[in-house]
Image (cartoon, grey):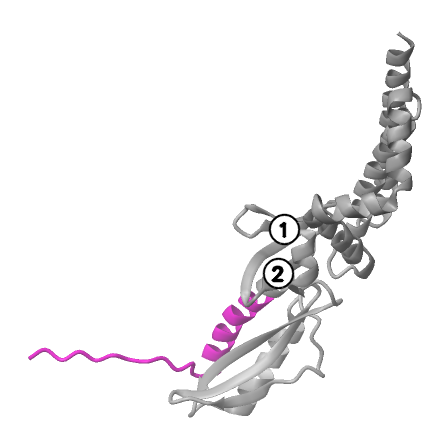
Amino acid sequence: MNNLLEIGIFILIEIVLNRLVNLAFRIMSKKHNSVHLRFIKSAANFLVALVVVYCLSQQFEVTKDISRVLLQSSSLVVAIATFAAQQALSNVISGFSLSMSKPYNVEDKIKVVQGGSVVAEGMVKDITIRHTVIRQFNGECCIVPNSVMDAAIITNTNFNGNIGNFLEIEISFGSNIEEAMVVLQKICIEHQLTLNTSENGVFVKGYTQNGVVLKTTVWTKNLDHSFQACSDIRITVLKEFKKRNISVPYQNVTIYHA
């Protein structure tokens, strides 16, 4: 009966400690909802469980000697970690590496590339002691082991403060190039989602068989704003070019009947 009471007390202690850890990290995440906090929380919960199990094993003669030997025998622990849980240990170590270097954060849009192939592309939702959860643009969640994330090439569109997206517009050879450049620059500056200023110029990228290609960079705070701003600018450009008789070339196909 006493043994069952001791086991119940230790289980209760573990539950209380885990809830305290979750509460502490929940408070910290309100101020800074970073991915490394979620990983450290998982690691802390695991450490609490490990300590409680060890302390519980010390209460019984049957398990006391076994637990002491396992703890003191570092060579045995290393051997078990190497052969029985090599991949799991690799994920844990990679998780700590990602937590310290912070190549991505919660809600960041990333693309994970390994060996020339895209492993996953979407928004980071969570990171645990073993894996990273990425919600892809089609709604599916991709669970990627931390060892893969640590070794892969990660493109993070939110890593820097602002997002730059190239915008190209083609006009006909007979159009007024200087006027078209001024109009395009003005539209980019005046859009409510852009960060463009007069320093962000418009340039002639080159020539095609149909006309002249103008190129500029649209700067926004994030990727969602970039998509919306570029779409709006393309629509506005067509309207303004039409008012000023600036032609956007397109191919005509003439079909002759025999």
Q: Residue at x 74, y 67 (%)?
A: 160
Quarter assignment of residue 172: bottom left
Depicted 123 relative to depicted 15: above or below: below
Magenta span has 114? Answer: no
Helix, strand or loop for disc 2: strand
State the extent of the magenta-drawn residues as a range.
229-258
Q: Amino acid at mark 1?
A: Val
Q: Position of residue 248 (x, y in %)?
A: 43, 81
Depicted 111 relative to depicted 258: above or below: above
Picture disc at residue 104: none
Q: Circles 1 and 2: CB distance less than 8 Å?
A: yes
Quarter assignment of residue 199: bottom right
Q: Residue at x 51, y 76 (%)?
A: 240
Residue behind mark 1: 144
Left/right placement of residue 211 relative to residue 165 reads: left
Q: Residue at x 50, y 90 (%)?
A: 206
Q: Position of residue 257 (x, y in %)?
A: 10, 78
Q: Amino acid at mark 2?
A: Val
Picture disc at residue 112: 2
Asked whether 52 or 105 is in front, the reply is: 52
